[in-house]
Image: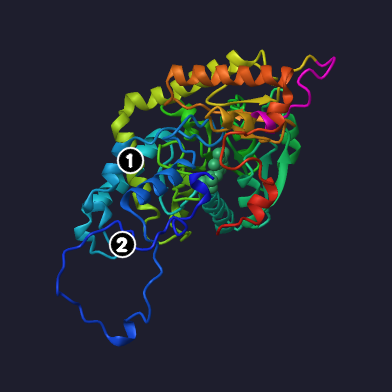
């Protein structure tokens, strides 16, 4: 039996205790109706047992603080601890949202400073910090687009164009906002096909949502032409800046022609994420949309202030010059892995990538199945045995066996080299002893759960 097979209640032994308090007569009298009628059934365990139990539980989780986490389209970069220290300063952490404005000058300065910094990085005019996630930001941005058209009496614009490589939240947000979705195809080289975009444009188009670099890690080189075409038909351009890493300090969405965008502070700007929150998806706008920026009230007060604060600490710590290096190193890391592994994994779109790239499963020579049916899922599960988190798999949907790798700028060459070595080892295992892969993971507390049931019918209690 392993440590994680027992609840703290099962470790309980009558009379054992992990505390000691001085004998005293001091009593607080509570009204009778507030008193318990029987003793609480608390576990009786020693201090050491408590420490081990919770420390072991914490180790069952994989986080960026415990190992390499190359999750494409999710930027699991290191979250510097200085961010946490700043967010824990009592002047910030003890604030109440209804405090008089004169007592929160520091917090206001943070929001103003952040607005300026993000405007400088993105080329937008101003930001709202209300949205609490990327998808929340998308919805907010789309509401602004809708407001813009309606305010001009242009009520026929009911459609949003989304590329087939888009993050799933893009069409979902557009649908939630009441738009119909029109899909524009990518070409063989992974970029939007401008020729198939043209016939889609007309008086019913409210705008287009784009990610650049797109989810394949490729820069949409035709963005200027696309912006002109969409603007000419009366539509607006939405920029999904969840993963702005590659462009930081190099290229600005505002200069590419985008009118509105969101950033994921919990990806690009090094605040913690995973497990559902808390995040922050500030939305920035160009001149055209400025009058509408403060209309949607999508959350209370100033959004997730603690997250904004962490991101601000990160930006100030890097400074103007080093912000540029983050993106460059992120691109270097991604290209290094891609080139080192393309002998073993199928690289559908060769050439230089930005901060991430996509393999299409293990490489075999096509004449016979020399990887013995080992799938991307097998590779991902086997990686866990070697102590690495799996990359994003089966996304984007353009390839059947997609493995999307994003190393970020925060990993050392040694870590990246050991990841490359393990990926090569897994490719060799697939050719020589595929059963090892099919049964993986072998060393984790849980093996292979039913992926659908684990998400749809989670069992959250013992
Ligand atoms: C993560 C991501 C989103 C959604 O962000 P959430 O905070 O998870 O809602 C949107 N677009 C892209 C490209 C992303 O990677």
Graded by Cα atoms within 10 Å as few (under 14), some (14 to 19) or many (20 or more), the crowding at tag 2 reads few
Colour logic: rainbow
- Which residue is rendered at x = 39% and y = 22% of the image? 325
Looking at the image, the residue that sits furthest to the right is 367
Q: Which residues are magenta?
A: 366-379
The image position of residue 286, as x and y in percent, is 46, 42
- Which residue is rendered at x = 35% and y = 44% of the image? 115
The image position of residue 119, as x and y in percent, is 39, 39
Image check: 312 left or right of 296?
A: left
Looking at the picture, does residue 40 appear above or below residue 257? below
Image check: 318 left or right of 207?
A: left
The image position of residue 348, as x and y in percent, is 70, 21
- Disc 1 designates what residue? 312
Q: Could you say which is closer to the camera, residue 18 or residue 122?
A: 18
State which quarter of the image contains the N terminus. top right
Does residue 320 appear in this view?
yes
- Disc 2 designates what residue? 97
Find out whether residue 71 is within the magenta segment. Answer: no
Q: Is the CB–ligand 1 distance for label 1 below 8 Å?
A: no
Q: Secondary structure at mark 2?
A: loop
């Amino acid at each position: 039996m392993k440590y994680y097979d027992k609840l703290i209640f099962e470790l309980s032994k009558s009379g054992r205790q992990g505390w000691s308090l001085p004998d005293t007569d001091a009593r607080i009298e509570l009204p009778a109706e507030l008193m318990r009628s029987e003793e609480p059934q608390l576990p009786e365990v020693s201090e050491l047992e408590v420490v081990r139990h919770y420390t072991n539980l914490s180790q069952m989780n994989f986080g960026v603080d415990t190992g390499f986490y190359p999750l494409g389209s999710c930027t699991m970069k290191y979250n510097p601890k200085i961010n946490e220290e700043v967010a824990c300063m009592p002047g910030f952490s003890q604030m109440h949202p209804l405090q008089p404005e004169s007592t929160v000058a520091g917090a206001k300065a943070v929001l103003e400073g952040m607005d300026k910094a993000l405007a400088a990085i993105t080329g937008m005019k101003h930001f709202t910090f209300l949205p609490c996630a990327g998808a929340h930001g998308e919805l907010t941005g789309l509401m602004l687009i809708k407001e813009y058209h309606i305010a001009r009496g242009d009520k026929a614009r009911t459609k949003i164009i989304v590329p087939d490589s888009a993050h799933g939240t893009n069409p979902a947000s557009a649908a939630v906002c009441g738009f119909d979705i029109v899909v524009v195809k990518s070409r063989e080289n992974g970029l939007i096909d401008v020729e198939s975009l043209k016939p889609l444009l007309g008086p019913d188009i409210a705008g287009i949502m784009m990610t650049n670099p797109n989810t394949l890690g490729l820069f949409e080189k035709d963005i200027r032409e696309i912006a002109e075409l969409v603007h000419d038909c009366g539509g607006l351009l939405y920029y999904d800046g969840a993963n702005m890493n590659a462009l930081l300090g190099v290229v600005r969405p505002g200069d590419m022609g985008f009118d509105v965008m969101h950033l994921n502070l919990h990806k690009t700007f090094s605040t913690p994420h995973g497990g559902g929150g808390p995040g922050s998806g500030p939305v920035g706008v160009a001149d055209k949309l400025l009058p509408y920026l403060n209309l949607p009230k999508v959350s209370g007060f100033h959004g997730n202030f603690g997250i904004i604060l962490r991101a601000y600490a990160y930006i100030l710590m890097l400074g103007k010059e080093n912000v540029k290096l983050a993106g460059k190193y992120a691109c270097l890391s991604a290209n290094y892995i891609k080139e080192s592994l393309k002998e073993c994994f199928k690289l559908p779109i060769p050439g230089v990538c930005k901060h991430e790239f996509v393999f299409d499963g293990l490489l075999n020579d096509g004449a016979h199945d020399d990887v013995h049916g080992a799938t991307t899922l097998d590779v991902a599960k086997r990686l866990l045995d070697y102590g690495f988190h799996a990359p994003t798999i089966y996304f984007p949907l353009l390839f059947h066996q997609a493995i999307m790798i994003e190393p970020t700028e925060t990993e050392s060459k040694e870590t990246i080299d050991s990841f490359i070595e393990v990926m090569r080892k897994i490719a060799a295992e697939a050719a020589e002893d595929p059963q090892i892969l099919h049964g993986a993971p072998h060393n984790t507390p849980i093996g292979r759960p039913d992926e659908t049931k684990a998400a749809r019918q989670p069992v959250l209690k013992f």
